[in-house]
Image (cartoon, grey):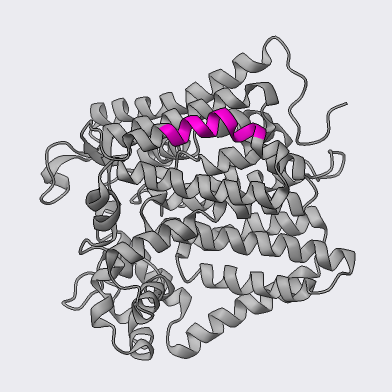
Amino acid sequence: MTRPDEAPPERATGIPADIVAGIAGLLLVLVALVVGMLTGARLYGSAQFPNASPGFGEYPILGHLSPHVGPGTVLAVVVAMAAVAWGPALAERLRWRTALLGAYLLSVSWILALALVDGWYVGVVRRLATRDEYLHEVPGITDIPTMLHTFSDRILSLRPDSWTTHVSGHPPGATLVFVWLDRIGLSGPTAAALVCVLVAGLVAVAVPVTVAALGRRDLARAALPFVALLPGAVWLGVSADAMFAGVVAVGVAVLAVGCVRLTDGRSAGGVLCAAAGLVLGFGIFLSYGLLLMAPVALAVVLVSRCWRALLYAVPAALAVAGVFALAGFWWLDGYHLVVERYYEGIAAHRPYWYWVWANLACLAVAVGPAAVAGLRRTAPRFLDGLPGRAPLTPVVALVRGAALAVLTADLSGLSKAETERIWLPFAVWLVLAAAALPGASRRWWLVAQAGTALVVNHVLLTSW
């Protein structure tokens, strides 16, 4: 008998159906490219992107078409081969904490190797050094209270002192992180980039820890190499969104551990849930879109059946919002101004009818074919937990929560002017679906995951 969340016994048609699903996810990108070119929905070149080269545009992945190799090519291939050859076995056999450490080191190595395909300067240093990035504004922020109090006044673009693109498009918490790094001596784009990578690598620990805390360490072990070898690592190195993904993933993991401790009557459960609330509360001040992490966090509460956790986590999250409000920044005001600025830019030129599905094609690349194939197996269980259905289990609940978040963002239209990196905080949870794939096929799916990332990174110079 198969346990919930596990792959059913392989039948003659099981594996091929998974392969069809995985290939379909990648082919959706090709369909989006062709449709975009035929209908004019695709933007490219200097006509739509000032100072851009003719090869820059939407494929639909945003980037410059430039097949290349670089210093990280050999390293990336070696890391991928090692992960495929030994990753699944080590994830199963190593002691749990050792396996988590290995997953973290693999994740960081994979992110850096892919970034180095573009070279140290282009792939790492320059990513956070452009005038659109947070670091551009850091030298001018000498008074944090004043910055917070006047932050909303500088969000709209049609004024001489408006914030640069990324600063204006996010709550002030994102900028504050880089200001604080500067204050403690980690100044400049190199230090900031490495911090983003090191924090991003935490997803390879936090996501499996969440599943294990909720009672399925077997599936957590199965997921370890897939989370660490995420194709979205192309954008994890290097972007601030990579850091956002790491922060909120840790928040969810702490919540899961706290819920279990509360349920078991063990010490520190309430403290951990409150800490999770603080982290997740700060998350929505890193990015407005991270409010949509709520379904993922709620999935933890549903599976653990620990509603008491909300009595600790919610007030803690509200306390973070209260601190920002007292400092002069009201989240809702910032959100409404960002929506207004949103349509002052590229959002006005990107058609909803196209990007409402082309964005999902980009997401399919970020999560990889293994996650798409895994979704084929987990999606039919999305109604679990309802009366008359099977009990809700960790992987199904977390994947369902992430899928709900993605669909909400996509249907809202407020993601159609964004790039692939915005999906990273949700992609790391969607890739859990790969744990539902049959064990005998997982090594080949890891090959597909690594191959997806390597092809994208060597064909395109991705942007943002």
The picture quadrant where one finds residue 90 is top right
Query: Which residue is painted at 41% across and 72% down in the image?
Result: 171
Looking at the image, residue 325 lies above or below residue 102: below
Most common SS among magenta residues:
helix
Q: Residue at x 25, y 37 (%)?
A: 70
Does residue 437 appear left or right of residue 49 in this picture?
right
The location of residue 372, given as percent across then percent down, is 55, 31
Q: Where is residue 203 in the image (x, y as percent from the top left)?
A: 55, 53
Magenta-colored stretch includes residue 88 = yes
Q: Horizontal and vertical percent for residue 292?
A: 55, 58
Q: Image check: 66 left or right of 8?
A: left
* Extent of the magenta region: 78-89
The residue lying at 72 percent from left, 46 percent from top is: 95
Q: In this view, does 420 lie to the left or right of 84?
A: left
Q: Residue at x 46, y 81 (%)?
A: 330
How far across and down, in percent of the image, does residue 300 sit?
A: 72, 56
Q: Does the magenta stretch include residue 125?
A: no
The answer to whether residue 438 is visible is: no
